């Protein structure tokens, strides 16, 4: 089992060893009919307040890893624990509640609703959390301020640049202050300058305490993360940026 | 920016926000329900983002419902008009007709109407006698062409008893009882090609038997006794003097108060023809109109079936639209699942969308149908009636059809694995 300790940049007061890890994979295997083994007995633990890049070529199994961490897919064998809760035996409603409250997702292609303004897009991320409607807007407004888009709240996605759209998507992912922020190629659809700025924002959120897992195939992005997990052929090849 | 963010220190873990305070027994977050307002808003997404498609997909339901409302409302209106007509003319007219038996003509005494008037509740009575004569425009006309017209001797009070009126000229009166004058029924006048009555210096005449009669009046269409429209009426004594009429009545019309109709009907036969009352056929002409109305109702039953088929096709249209919507919005479904939507909430969203579509179509159809039915009724001069219960029921059933149509697409949407949904282009 691999533990990823706090990073040098992390604020020690936010590192709580007594808390359960934000996400933990125990001997997780994911096989598809074929049979194709996407993940082969992977064990991984991301503690609260840490940030890690999952790096690998396409087809290495890193996307599957993110889907399993996000309970969007279930492992064939092994156990995924979120915030200390085993998820294997949970039903759809409980998994959905976990995603709504504990997880935030950022996707390569933003996945914003074109017909909603920035603030409504962010508020839509709170729809399934049970937060009352009026509070949703207030929280969304806070989140937009945090990503530096407070003045663009009433803009539609079509009126925003790619980088701004991804910021809106990040605001949506963190508006409910998730235990774990999962980003799948967050800079993949952006040019390097804009992508760098988006990564800056993610790292700022990490600095402020958010647990972060970034899936990327881009070595430059991986290099800027405090820790890296290299995945190839469904196995964890090596861990970098660890402290003993 | 880093400083400001760190300075705020508001990125504390999730326990801070109100939504995660409530936890299940195992420390897991509780699944939350969507508020009704959120459900409604989710259900409106499809309609709002693709209004044209929404309109087209609900067209079937709208047309079906409009038809349904029309076929129910229009007969109701015409029925109401008929009832109003009865209310004015009275449905309290009784017709007693002598039925020929074994080829022998049966007839009433010449004073049949007077006899009928002596029945207690009877308020008025008139009589007609069958004159076996052919009416023609001129001697050059083949008698066979006007065979549908009957020549009847009439008591002068006929019009008032059957609530008829003359369109032009005047009706028979005691003063004209002995002169060779005739009054034409509305259809009889048309059939003979006579459009106006006699004026001084310009007599209009018809040939009855071998004798010329001056046309002094043309009747308006009879409101209840429409068979009189095909008759040519002459005075009682005129018929006897000029046409060899035997003076015996064959039909008697009687007016009586509504609540005495049964009693009067029962004694009318024995009164008019005591020797064989069974040969007197006593009817209420308004019943015939009511029966005609009932026939229309049967026809509208077929139309309702047609409307139901159209509703069914409309439901299929909505199901089709929903399948396309689910295919198109896979990404949205995946995103919502990632944001924490349960399968049930996805199902509810798409089911709600189908119900929204069908309810909108249903309301539109009901509105169009009601407007059209009202317009038609006004154009026909009928009182507009709106079958509110039927309209409400059909809007509800259209909504139910939408729910049924949307069920399978919604289940498909909910079953979509989130990873597959997110990966779709």
Image: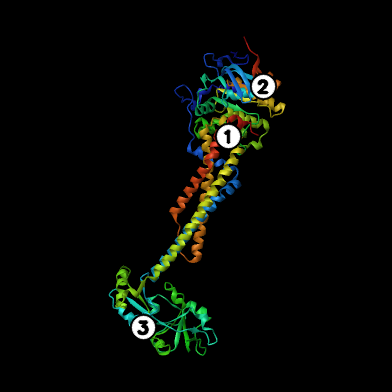
Q: Are marks 2 and 1 on the same chain?
A: no
Q: Quadrant of the N terminus of chain B?
A: top right
Q: Is residue A37 left or right of residue B170?
A: right
Q: Nearer the viewer, mark 2 or mark 1?
A: 2
> Relative to the observer, which residue lies in front, A242 or B220?
B220
Q: Which label sits on residue B248?
A: 3
Q: Which residue is mark 2?
A: A60
Q: Chain of mark 3?
A: B
Q: Mark yes or no: residue B349 visible.
A: yes
Q: Which residue is mark 1?
A: B333
Q: CA distance from mark 3 to mark 1?
A: 89 Å
Q: Chain of mark 1?
A: B
Q: CA distance from mark 2 to mark 1?
A: 26 Å
> Relative to the observer, which residue lies in front, B143 or B391?
B143
Rendering quarter of residue A115: top right
Q: Residue at x 52, y 79 (%)?
A: B191
Q: Residue B331, image x and y in percent? A: 61, 34
Q: Chain of mark 2?
A: A
């Amino acid at each position: 089992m691999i533990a990823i300790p706090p990073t040098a940049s992390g604020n020690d007061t936010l590192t709580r060893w007594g808390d359960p890890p934000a996400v933990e994979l125990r001997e997780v295997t994911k096989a598809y009919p074929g049979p194709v083994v996407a993940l082969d007995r992977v064990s991984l633990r991301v503690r609260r307040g840490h940030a890690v890049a999952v790096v690998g070529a396409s087809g290495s199994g890193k996307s599957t890893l993110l889907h399993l961490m996000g309970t969007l897919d279930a492992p064939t064998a092994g156990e995924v624990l979120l915030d200390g809760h085993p998820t294997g035996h949970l039903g759809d409603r409980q998994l959905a509640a976990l995603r709504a409250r504990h997880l935030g997702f950022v996707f390569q292609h933003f996945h914003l609703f074109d017909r909603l303004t920035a603030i409504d897009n962010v508020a839509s991320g709170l729809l399934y959390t049970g937060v009352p409607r009026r509070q949703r807007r207030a929280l969304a407004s806070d989140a937009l301020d945090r990503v530096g888009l407070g003045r663009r709240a009433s803009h539609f996605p079509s009126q925003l640049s790619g980088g701004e759209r991804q910021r809106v998507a990040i605001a949506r992912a963190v508006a409910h202050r998730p235990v774990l922020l999962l980003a799948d190629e967050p800079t993949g659809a952006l040019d390097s300058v804009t992508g760098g700025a988006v990564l800056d924002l993610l790292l700022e959120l990490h600095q402020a305490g958010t647990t972060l897992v970034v899936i990327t195939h881009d070595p430059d992005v991986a290099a800027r993360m405090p820790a890296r997990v290299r995945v190839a052929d469904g196995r964890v090849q090596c861990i970098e940026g660890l402290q003993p | 920016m880093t400083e400001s963010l760190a300075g705020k220190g508001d990125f504390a873990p999730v326990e801070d926000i109100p939504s995660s305070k409530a936890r299940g027994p195992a420390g897991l977050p509780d699944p939350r329900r969507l508020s009704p307002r959120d459900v409604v808003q989710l259900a409106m997404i499809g309609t709002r983002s693709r209004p044209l498609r929404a309109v087209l997909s609900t067209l079937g339901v709208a047309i079906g419902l409009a038809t349904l409302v029309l076929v129910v409302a229009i007969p109701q209106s015409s029925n109401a008009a008929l009832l109003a007509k009865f209310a004015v003319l009275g449905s309290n007219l009784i017709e007693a007709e002598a039925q020929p038996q074994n080829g022998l003509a049966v007839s009433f005494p010449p004073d049949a109407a007077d006899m009928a008037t002596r029945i207690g509740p009877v308020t008025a009575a008139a009589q007609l006698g069958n004159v076996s004569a052919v009416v023609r425009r001129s001697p050059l006309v083949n008698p066979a062409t006007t065979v549908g017209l009957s020549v009847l001797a009439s008591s002068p009070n006929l019009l008032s008893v059957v609530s008829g009126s003359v369109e032009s000229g005047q009706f028979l009166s005691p003063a004209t009882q002995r002169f060779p004058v005739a009054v034409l029924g509305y259809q009889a006048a048309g059939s003979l090609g006579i459009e106006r009555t006699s004026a001084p210096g310009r007599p209009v005449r018809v040939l009855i038997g071998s004798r010329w009669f001056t046309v002094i009046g043309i009747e308006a269409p009879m409101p209840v006794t429409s068979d009189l429209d095909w008759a040519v009426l002459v005075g009682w004594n005129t018929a006897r003097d000029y046409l060899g009429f035997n003076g015996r009545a064959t039909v008697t019309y009687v007016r009586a108060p509504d609540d005495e109709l049964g009693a009067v009907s029962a004694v009318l036969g024995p009164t008019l023809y005591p020797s064989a009352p069974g040969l007197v056929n006593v009817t209420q002409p308004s019943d015939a109109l009511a029966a005609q109305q009932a026939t229309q109702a049967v026809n509208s039953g077929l139309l309702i079936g047609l409307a139901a088929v159209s509703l069914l096709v409309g439901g299929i249209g909505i199901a089709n639209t929903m399948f396309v919507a689910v295919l198109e919005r896979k990404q949205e479904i995946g995103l919502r699942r990632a944001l924490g939507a349960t399968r049930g909430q996805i199902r509810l969203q798409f089911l709600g969308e189908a119900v929204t579509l069908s309810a909108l179509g249903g309301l539109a159809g009901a509105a169009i149908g009601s407007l059209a039915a009202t317009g038609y009724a006004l154009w026909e001069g009928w009182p507009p009636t709106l079958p509110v219960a039927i309209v409400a029921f059909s809007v509800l059933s259209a909504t139910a059809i939408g729910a049924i149509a949307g069920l399978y697409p919604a289940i498909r949407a909910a079953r979509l694995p989130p990873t597959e949904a997110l990966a779709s282009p």
